[in-house]
Image (spheres, rainbow, N blue to C red):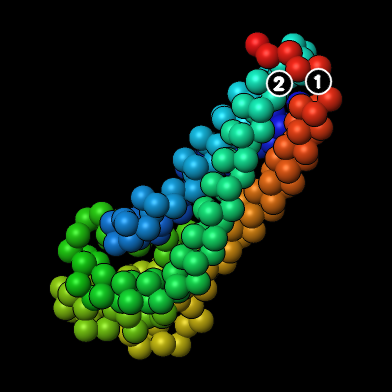
Amino acid sequence: FLLQLSGLSLLAVGIWLTVDRDPFLHLLAPFSNQFLQLINIGLFCISIGATLVLLGLLGSCGVRKESKCLQLTFFSIILVIFISEVAAGVVALAYSSFAENILRAWATPVLQNDYGIDPMVTRIWNTTMTDLKCCGFSNYTDFMGSEFEDQNEYGLPPSCCHNIDPCSPAEAAHLPVQGCFDHILKILREKTITVGGIAAGVGLLEIAAMIISMYLFSHLDGKVS
């Protein structure tokens, strides 16, 4: 029953991560596609959660029928899932350790060359800057010398001047509008802590389930079904 509850918790987290994705992360996806294909945390949580719910039913049937075969199957699948979760956690930690460098190397060139030119990039950056009340990646200087500034006669996005339009570099320099980098990192860390805490709890339940499964396996009378 607890295993099924943990599976439902992972399902809920997976759906939350899939639906409540920050617009900036959508923009980052094409750049780091090879990593996001490997670590799609939302879909991973959904698949593991659904599997744990089904395994809870399998374990209950194994106990009810006193079947060593079902108990051994239950233990084996839980072990594989546990190893997969540990591996995914290690890869996710490794990825997060150099995510800051990836963001820095990618964001400024995008703002310089694509903002104001590519509609999708422009829309997502505008949404990000408006929602987080920030300007550019590091600060307003990310737009200096950009295609957007050239097209707008040395103007900056309104978000850099508290949504005052037109926004000039001189005005932006005297306003306390920060870059989006710290805000984005805060969002990523908050989601990481939430997912990590739930995953740790689920991992402990899986270990307990494997111990109980082996205990029952060793005390069954040898029926196989």
**Residue at 36 percent of width and 50 percent of height:** 37
Question: Picture coordinates of residue 184 (x, y %)?
Answer: 49, 66
Residue, disc 1: 220
Give the spatial CA distance, label 2 vs label 1. 7 Å
Q: Is residue 121 left or right of residue 127?
A: left
Quarter placement of the N terminus: top right
Question: Picture coordinates of residue 38 (x, y %)?
Answer: 39, 52
SS state under label 1: loop
Quarter placement of the C terminus: top right
Question: Picture coordinates of residue 193 (x, y %)?
Answer: 64, 58
Q: Which label belongs to residue 68?
A: 2
State the residue in front, 101 or 164.
101
**Residue at 78 percent of width and 38 percent of height:** 211
> Residue type at mark 1?
Leu
Q: Residues within 10 Å of mark 1 (few under 14, many from 20)?
A: some
**Residue at 52 percent of width and 53 percent of height:** 88
